[in-house]
Image (spheres, grey):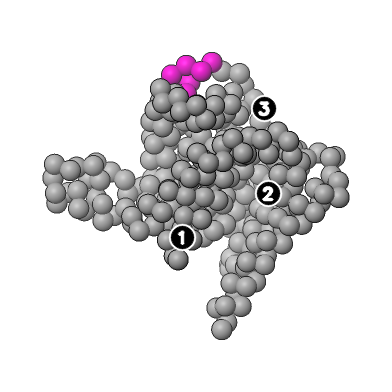
Amino acid sequence: MKKLLTVLHGFLVGLCDLIPGISGGTMAFILGIYERLITFIKNISLDTIAVWDKKRFRKGIKNLDLGFTIPFFSGILLALFLLANLMDHILTTFPIYTYAFFFGLIAASSFIIASHIRGWTRKRVTFLSVGFCIGLIASFVTGLMLPHTGLVLFISGFIAAAAMLLPGVSGSYILLILGQYEHITGALRTFDFSTLIIVAIGVLLGLYAMSHLISYLLKHQHQLTIFFLLGLVLGSLYIFIGKIGYNWSVISILWFVIGLVLPLAIDFFGKSRKRK
């Protein structure tokens, strides 16, 4: 049951990564698995592939927390390959309803995270504000039209993966800004491995570099980092306001309320079970 829940967590993170403007890192942060995910990525080293040295290999594998990471990344891959076409259709056909739902979901989840944090000092609120401003500014960045060359695809993968680990900064939104989103999602649909391999190399290096930076900050300045990350999530909510604009209707408000109520209900029932 626990592994199935981890697959579901991975599936939700993968789903968010498919939607421009919504961060998989945000979902991991909301689900409470963010630090565990960062630790896993940081622990990937040459030891994990040193099959020629059994001692090093065992040590490397032991540090990877495979009981969590295998079902989690299986869920992400499942979402990417099963839902790439579906999410493209939903975003094309019902963009306002989709963004309204996720607006409610992330807004409520941010409130829950904030309500669980203790120790609101002036310094921590400053870091929250800085994160908020960066998330807000990122919401206003417009798109570029770059060619689909190998170098551009590699750099796009690197930047998107690094951004993906930051709550509030969407990897797919970065790809959209760089003009590579449709090309890469098309490669996923058609299994264009020549494109996917180049992007994957950039993604892996981006994840490695950013995970080490975030892990260091969480280790040495844990609370300040959490406040900064929460600020990023709150600032990025403007993306949804921009996407929806003045196109609110009864149905879009309903989807917003569903997204709002869902995490609040889960949090309420979770607290109720703990009391019992």
Specify which label sits upstream in the sequence, 3 or 1.
Answer: 1
Q: Which residue is drawn at 85% across and 39% down?
A: 246
Task: Classify residue 35 by image quadrant.
Answer: bottom left
Give the label, 2 or 3, closer to the camera: 2
Query: In which quadrant is the C terminus drawn?
Result: bottom right
Front position in the image: 49 or 129: 49
Residue type beneath disc 3: Thr
Where is 182 relative to 272, above or below?
above
Q: On the picture, is 201 further left or further right than 105? A: left
Q: Can residue 223 be seen in this view?
A: no
Q: Which residue lies furthest to the bottom in this view?
A: 276
Q: What residue sits right under mark 3 in the picture?
A: 142
Residue 118, given in percent of the width and then of the height, sits at 58, 68
Q: Are marks 1 and 2 in contact (CB under 8 Å)?
A: no
Q: Residue at x 19, y 48 (%)?
A: 57
Residue type beneath disc 1: Leu
For the record, the magenta segment spans: 147-153
Residue 50, given in percent of the width and then of the height, sits at 19, 42
Label 1: which secondary element: helix
Where is 265 relative to 246, above or below?
below
Q: What residue sits right under mark 2 in the picture?
A: 102
Residue type beneath disc 2: Phe
